[in-house]
Image: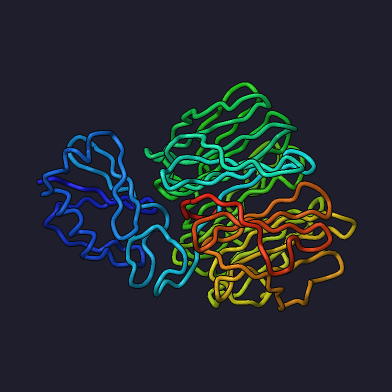
Amino acid sequence: MANFRVIWEGAILTFSENETQTLQKGFDLQADLLALMGDLASNAVLSGILGAAANYIQVNRAIIALADQGNGFDLHIPWPAIVAGQWWLMWPTGVIPNATAVDSSAGAVAAWGPNRLDVFSIGMDRAMYHGSWDGSSWNLWEALGGGFTSPPAVTSWGPNRLDIVGLGMDSAMYHGSWDGNSWNLWESLGGRFASPPVVTSWGPNRLDIFGIGMDGAMYHGSWDGNSWNVWEGLGGGFASPPAVTCGGGINRLDVFGLGMDSAMYHGWWDGNSWHVWESLGGKFASLPTPSAPAVASRSPGRLDIFLLGTDQDMLHNYWNGATWQGWESMGGVFISPPAVAHLGGPNNRVDIFGIGPGNQMWHKAVDDGGWYPWAKDWEAMGGKFSSPPTVASWGPGRLDIFGLGLDHGMFHKAWDGAWRPSPSDWEGLGGVFQHSAPV
């Protein structure tokens, strides 16, 4: 009798093919999953499927990782792969029948210089793919290999430098880099994580990576220019992936995540020590599992945080350099977590994006003069998306927004004083990509 461990959001349950249990994470573990386990255990071709240490099985349009553990098999279900509604186990694709949310990511984007963009996403083969804009044309899509169970996260600590991280099939952290001449792919940084990672850089040759461990605690790893320091436990108990910003200055980090009580928690590094964790309160939507908040810093000592409330409206809180101002509703109704970017300029503008009804993109901005178009109104931007947006700015007054369409392809829109190609149209960049948890 073969045993299977279902690994989802850090919860590990062991099954035999004849058992029935419920995954107590807010969703029933459907009988179909148990039937799948039984089919695998009795299938004559099982030995062929398990010929390698890690394989993929596609069932009901779900891609799950199957890892041979010697005395049984681990089914790694991507976060989140169980969604409300008829399609009980799937990698979210397009408009999902009966699903309540779009909780997946287009990928990651970074800009290491003016008029330069580097976009990363996970293909259907679980490999990493890279596309770039060089100032005059797109270069699409370069295969970088690897095998990933999370979306990527990327940052740049200097011109012509990129550092990419993602979770491998063994739930460990993997790192790749571009040094200006060649790719260096993929080194394992170890650890075992239950959430997609985030990465940032507050100075040259410096990296800070955060992720949620299998125990629900926050973990931190860093590159100091000479060596990796992994993994430092920061404690806490988190139900969402983290968000991080280094907008407070050199050797300053601010980290956010949703606790098990659905409240927002904040921790920070002041250059000498960690201060963890202060509760910022609030109650937030789960989509169907809690998603990472979006955070931006639009001036020294200023932090703006965005996430969806339980009514799926956009909530906002900010630190003014002295105190937190409390949660306020920005209106709207959203089916994805938000993405934010600092547009810059004399008025310190921040732009917020999210997917709303009809899977359309919606937009709002705030600067020192107030909210645009209005405090609780949002600008429709067209499109039909099956992922939340990803956004970057390579210079003052410039925004580039990306999202996955219903065909799994990448779509792009830019702002340079006007929306390009138009307020409602999007530029197709092709490709066929996985949908995974938000970054």
Percent from the top left, x then y, of residue 438? 53, 55
**Is residue 86 at all visible to an observer of this figure?**
yes
Q: Residue at x 81, y 60 (%)?
A: 349
Q: Residue at x 65, y 47 (%)?
A: 268
Would you place residue 435 above or below residue 204 in this image? below
**Is residue 199 at all visible to an observer of this figure?**
no
Counting labels gives 0
Along the line of sight, the residue nearer the viewer: 301 or 190? 190
Percent from the top left, x then y, of residue 82? 36, 62
Would you place residue 438 above or below residue 386 in this image? above
Q: Residue at x 71, y 32 (%)?
A: 160
Along the line of sight, the residue nearer the viewer: 13 or 55? 55
Q: Quadrant of residue 88?
A: bottom left
Q: Residue at x 41, y 43 (%)?
A: 125
Percent from the top left, x then y, of residue 52? 27, 33
Percent from the top left, x then y, of residue 201? 68, 38
Along the line of sight, the residue nearer the viewer: 21 or 107? 107
Colour scheme? rainbow
* Residue, far top: 226
Does residue 26 appear left or right of residue 122 in this picture? left
* Residue, far right: 346
Does residue 145 appear left or right of residue 155 in this picture? left
